[in-house]
Image (cartoon, rainbow, N blue to C red):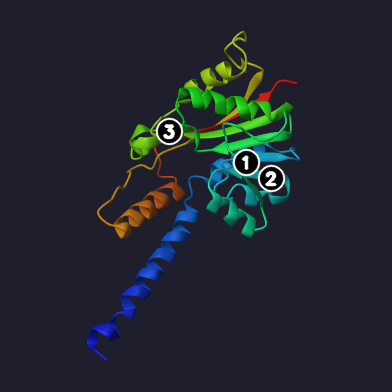
C-alpha cells in the first residue's frame, strides 16, 4: 500500500468535519429562520396554511399538520413527501385551489424570479386563495449585490414595489396606503446584511467558508442595522 493511499482518508475526514461544523454554524446563524418564525407569528391562529414554492419543506416542518406546500420542482416535492409533509406539484402563477381555500398563505424568495407581469399574477393568486380576514406573508430578497449573482432571476422587488403590485393585483380602484386593494398592511420584518460580506468563489470549499463567516456574523448580531437586504411583509385580506 502506498504512502499516498495511507494518507488519503485523513483529508477526506477533515473536509467532512469542516463541512459538518460549517453546516451547524449556518443553522445557528441562519438568516431565514428568523423570517420563518416571524411568518408563523403572523399566521398564528391559521388552521390551514399554503406554502407556495415550498422547496425542501423547511417552513412546512415548523407546523407540518397545518401546512400544504406546492412547488414546481419534482425532486423538492418528493423530498418533502419523504419527510411526511403534504407537498404537491404546482405552479405559483396558477394555483390549483378554489378561492378562499386557506386561512393563510406563505411564499418566500421566489418573486425575484418573475417579471413584473408574472409577479402581479403571482400576488393575485396568493390573494385569491386566501379567505377574507386571512393573512398573506411574502419574503423577498431585494439587495442587487446578492441577487444579481443569478442574472436569469435578478429582479430586486423593494417593499414599495410590492405594495404597488398588490394594488395592481387586486383592484385598480382602491386607495394606495395601509389599505391596498382589499388587503391591509399587518407587519414587516427586515433581513439585515452582515457587517462585512464575505465572498469567495474560487472553489466550492471557499464558497462554503464565506457562507459560514457570514452566518457567524449574523448569529453574533454583527449586522448593518441601518439597511436591509431582504424583507418579509404580512398583509391581511379584507373581510
- Quadrant of the rendered structure where residue 6 is? bottom left
Position above or below: 177 against 230:
above
**Residue annotated with mark 3:** 228
The residue closer to the viewer here, 218 or 131, is 131
Q: Which residue: 53% across, 20% down?
A: 165
Q: Nearer the viewer, mark 3 or mark 2?
A: 2
For disc 3, the neighbor class at 10 Å (few under 14, some 14 to 19, many from 20) is some
User: Label 3, label 2: how many angstroms apart (C-alpha)?
Assistant: 29 Å
Quadrant where the C terminus lies?
Answer: top right
Instruction: Tell me: 116 left or right of 128.
Output: left
Q: Secondary structure at mark 3?
A: loop
In 3D space, how far apart are the residues under numbered discs 3 and 1 (Cα atoms)?
24 Å
Q: Residue at x 66, y 39 (%)?
A: 50
Q: Which residue is mark 2?
A: 67
Q: Position of residue 44 (x, y in %)?
A: 71, 38
The residue pinned by badge 1 equals 51
Q: Earlier in the sequence, mark 3 or mark 1?
A: 1
Residue under the image location 48 percent in, 21 percent down: 161
**Can you give x and y, in whole percent of width and height, for residue 117 in the image?**
49, 22
Can residue 235 be seen at all in this image of the molecule?
Answer: no
Q: CA distance from mark 1 to mark 2?
A: 7 Å
Residues at marks 3 and 2 touching, judged by CB atoms closer than 8 Å: no
Is residue 217 in sight in this rendering? yes
Q: Residue 111 location in percent, x, y? A: 49, 32
Q: Position of residue 90 (x, y in %)?
A: 60, 41
Image marks 1 and 2: residues in contact by CB distance under 8 Å: yes
Amino acid at each position: 500500500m502506498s504512502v499516498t493511499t495511507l494518507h488519503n482518508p485523513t483529508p477526506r475526514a477533515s473536509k467532512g468535519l469542516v463541512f459538518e461544523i460549517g453546516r451547524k454554524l449556518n443553522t445557528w446563524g441562519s438568516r431565514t429562520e428568523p423570517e420563518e418564525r416571524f411568518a408563523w407569528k403572523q399566521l398564528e391562529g391559521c388552521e390551514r396554511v399554503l406554502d407556495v414554492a415550498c422547496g425542501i419543506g423547511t417552513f412546512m416542518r415548523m407546523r407540518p399538520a397545518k401546512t400544504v406546500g406546492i412547488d414546481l420542482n419534482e425532486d423538492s416535492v418528493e423530498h418533502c413527501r419523504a419527510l411526511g409533509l403534504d407537498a404537491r406539484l404546482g405552479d405559483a402563477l396558477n394555483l390549483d385551489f378554489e378561492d378562499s381555500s386557506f386561512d393563510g398563505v406563505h411564499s418566500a424568495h421566489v418573486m425575484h424570479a418573475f417579471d413584473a407581469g408574472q409577479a402581479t399574477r403571482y400576488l393575485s393568486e396568493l390573494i385569491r386563495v386566501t379567505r377574507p380576514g386571512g393573512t398573506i406573508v411574502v419574503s423577498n430578497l431585494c439587495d442587487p449585490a446578492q441577487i444579481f449573482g443569478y442574472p436569469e432571476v435578478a429582479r430586486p422587488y423593494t417593499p414599495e414595489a410590492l405594495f404597488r403590485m398588490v394594488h395592481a393585483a387586486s383592484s385598480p380602484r382602491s386607495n394606495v396606503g395601509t389599505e391596498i386593494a382589499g388587503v391591509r398592511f399587518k407587519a414587516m420584518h427586515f433581513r439585515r446584511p452582515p457587517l462585512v460580506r464575505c465572498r469567495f468563489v474560487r472553489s466550492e470549499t471557499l464558497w462554503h467558508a464565506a457562507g459560514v463567516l457570514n452566518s457567524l456574523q449574523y448569529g453574533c448580531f454583527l449586522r448593518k442595522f441601518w439597511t436591509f437586504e431582504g424583507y418579509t411583509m404580512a398583509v391581511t385580506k379584507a373581510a
